[in-house]
Image (cartoon, rainbow, N blue to C red):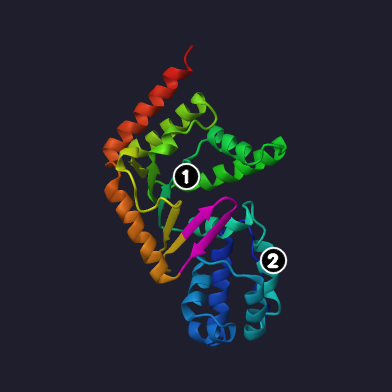
Amino acid sequence: MPGPKDLDPSASPRALLGAELRHARENAGLSQDELGQPLFVSGSFIGQLEAGTRRMHLEYARQIDEILGANGFFERNCKALAKSRYPDHFAEAAEAEAIATAIREYAALLIPGLLQTEGYARAVFRAYQPTATEDVIDELVAARLERARLLADPTTPLLWAVLDEAVLRRKVGGTAVMTEALRHVATLAQQHRVIVQVLPFGAGAHAAMQGTIKLMSFEDAPPLAYLQGPNTGRLEDDPATVTRHELTYDLLGATALSPRESLALIESVAEDYAHEDQP
């Protein structure tokens, strides 16, 4: 019988590879726990690979090929699917984000990537890489806008963002860019496509002063938390750790302005920028 065909990296890569893993494991008569034992991972980790919420790394792919007699299929496709438009520290989170049913994010300094306009994203990447060529910046901006296409679906994923007031006040790219960026966020909120809250300066100290948080929920897999810093990021799947970050997010939501008050503030700041830009 012919083996499985190599996967197309452009079509939900981790979900496709996960489906093939589930098929091969079941054909071998192994449970998730039984496959996980020789890999020194839990059955739930195998379940996350099969659901596409975790990336299959090369060392696991090689062992899985040997255990399941897949003739190098998983190693071959693992190498192909590892090619990403995103930085290494974010690639796995971006792939998980693409199949999440709900995304909750606290942004401390910048408008979240899924809510950014082209002008805002370009200003951000130019600040990150002041000496990069325009081609490099264009590629980064295109990848970010491609991510934002998730919101083209009218309902899924649910996106709930808590923005620190600093996000509104930091003039990224100038007044015209900020006017467009904040109006874009306001429009998505007005259309009920996203839930947005603003954490005002007046709230004082809060539960997430050390950085940003992104929480992702899935239909058939446990939730994940993504924590990001300068040129670094970490995807967490430990249940206790994720639960702790979920509590932090709940505290932020309780402290922030209501969605209606937040929308009014975002629109007001956008108008301030628009007036400032006029001669």
Q: Position of residue 137 (x, y in %)?
A: 66, 39
Instruction: Spot the residue most to the front.
Output: 205
Q: Nearer the viewer, residue 67 or 176?
A: 176
SS label for mark 2: helix
Q: State which region is magenta.
A: 226-237
Q: Amino acid at mark 2?
A: Lys
Q: Earlier in the sequence, mark 2 or mark 1?
A: 2
Badge number at residue 112: 1
Q: Nearer the viewer, residue 96 or 25?
A: 96
Magenta-drawn stretch, dominant element (helix, strand or loop):
strand
Q: Residues within 10 Å of mark 2 (few under 14, many from 20)?
A: few
Q: Quadrant of residue 38?
A: bottom right
How many marks the image carries: the answer is 2
Quadrant, the N terminus = bottom right
Does the magenta segment cover residue 46? Answer: no
Q: Amino acid at mark 1?
A: Pro
Location of mark 2 (residue): 79
Q: CA distance from mark 2 to mark 1?
A: 29 Å
Q: Quadrant of residue 270?
A: top left
Q: Nearer the viewer, residue 252 or 23?
A: 252
Q: Residues within 10 Å of mark 1 (few under 14, many from 20)?
A: many
Does the magenta segment cover residue 233? Answer: yes
